[in-house]
Amino acid sequence: SQQGEEDPQALSIQEGENATMNCSYKTSINNLQWYRQNSGRGLVHLILIRSNEREKHSGRLRVTLDTSKKSSSLLITASRAADTASYFCATDPWETSGSRLTFGEGTQLTVNP
Amino acid sequence: EPEVTQTPSHQVTQMGQEVILRCVPISNHLYFYWYRQILGQKVEFLVSFYNNEISEKSEIFDDQFSVERPDGSNFTLKIRSTKLEDSAMYFCASSDEDRATGELFFGEGSRLTVL
């Protein structure tokens, strides 16, 4: 089954605005993580939310998880031009025996100065 | 701040050649991974490694692939006979925790181009 589908695929906003990205998945999970990737660079872990958590905050980031709808959202408040990057959700499914993350297609966020 | 380092940053090879990609995970981490990202596509899991053995591998990780931790610091991915479709960015990652808390620390990647 396909996991971790983000929407929108691309999002363009002005500096100072909030950016919301959504992720849907299909199987039960242990946790869901959000990663950021600047163009041509490695993935940077942003935040992890466990299946028994509903909301988590870290600085300007807010993540929600709705396991009944199998969906998550990432909110970046007061965006900056430096937030321009691709954002991926990644799920750790129950049925696998190890820490095997399944990544989504990603949302390309552009923050215009 | 500790980081995962990967070499080479870019390798160009001919189809059928063997390639070894190298990674130095964060020193106190116990869990090691390889992922790949074909240009414009999603990041895909290849293999996880713990306690000197493969703990899980994906369908992509066939007999042409192997991993090794030859000493206390390096973690390598070998592709025995490269194909055109192996062209991708290969990311190494490490973690000090198991799946329950599993934040992964990724390297900057090795770009493999197979001609």
Image: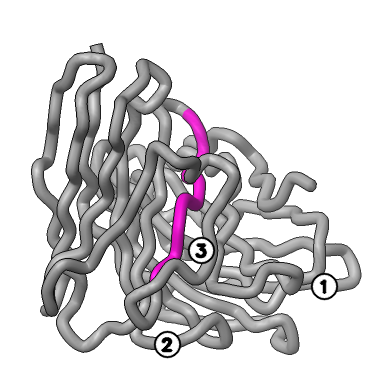
In the drawing, what numbered circle is on residue B97?
2
Q: Chain of mark 1?
A: A
From this viewpoint, which residue is outermost toward the right? A68
Residue that carries the numbered disc 1 in the rendered image: A67
Q: CA distance from mark 1 to mark 3?
A: 16 Å
The answer to whether A68 is drawn above or below residue B23 in the figure is: below
Q: CA distance from mark 3 to mark 2?
A: 17 Å
Element type at marker 1? loop
Residue A47 shown left or right of residue A83 in the figure:
right
* Percent coordinates x, y for residue B28 in the rendering: 21, 88
Q: Nearer the viewer, mark 3 or mark 2?
A: 2
Is B60 contained in the magenta span? no
What is the crowding at mark 3: few (fewer than 14 residues within 10 Å), some, or many (at least 20)?
many
Element type at marker 3? strand
The answer to whether A66 is drawn above or below residue A90 in the figure is: below
Residue name at image x 23 percent, y 47 percent: B109
- For the record, the magenta segment spans B41-49
What is the crowding at mark 2: few (fewer than 14 residues within 10 Å), some, or many (at least 20)?
some
Q: Chain of mark 3?
A: A
Any part of residue A13 in sight: no
Which image quarter: residue B78?
Answer: top left
In the drawing, what numbered circle is on residue A34?
3
Judge if badges 1 and 3 mark residues of a common chain: yes
Element type at marker 2? loop
Q: CA distance from mark 1 to mark 2?
A: 23 Å
Type of amino acid at the residue the image marks with label 2: Glu
